Amino acid sequence: MAVRAVRGAVQLERDDARHMDERVGALLTEVLERNDLTQDDLISVWFTATPDLHSDFPAAAARKLGITDVPLICAQELDIEGAMPRVVRLLAHIESDRPRSEVAHVYLGAAAALRKDIAQ
């Protein structure tokens, strides 16, 4: 079993804790489904949020999905002029037999514009 990394992002419509839970929960669920993963396959998940998001920690959404025994951490993205607003990104380290080329990176909605080269 190899260690792989999965990227993903989602843009929120507004800075609201319930909305963040919904959108980050959808992102995590999609990452698991598209890569045929279970929570047991997760090693750790790193979340970042743009500086305009203040309502909650993205990791709280993971905990509400029942991901309680996986190390999670949140950080703030760089405040770059012209960057897409209200974006939560994730970097999940996983155990998987998939070749690196077959890992499905997940960019939901408008966030697909961030990485057109790997968004699926």
Image (spheres, rainbow, N blue to C red):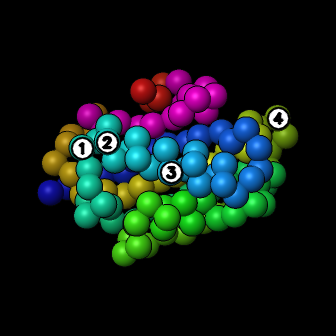
Q: Looking at the picture, does residue 3 appear above or below residue 35? A: below
Q: Amino acid at mark 1?
A: Asp
Residue at the location (41% across, 73% down)? 68
In three-dimensional space, the C-alpha distance between marks 3 and 2, rounded to whole angstroms, equals 12 Å
In three-dimensional space, the C-alpha distance between marks 4 and 3, rounded to whole angstroms, equals 26 Å
Q: Residues within 10 Å of mark 1 (few under 14, many from 20)?
A: few
**The C terminus - image quarter:** top left
Residues marked 1 and 2 touching at CB (< 8 Å): yes
Q: Which residue is the site of mark 2?
A: 33
Report x, y in % for residue 106.
45, 37
Q: Residues within 10 Å of mark 2 (few under 14, many from 20)?
A: few
Frontmost of labels 3 and 1 is: 3
In three-dimensional space, the C-alpha distance between marks 1 and 4, rounded to whole angstroms, equals 35 Å
Locate residue 69: give its quadrant: bottom left
Of the pair 49 and 15, the residue shown nearer to us: 15
Q: Which residue is the site of mark 1?
A: 36
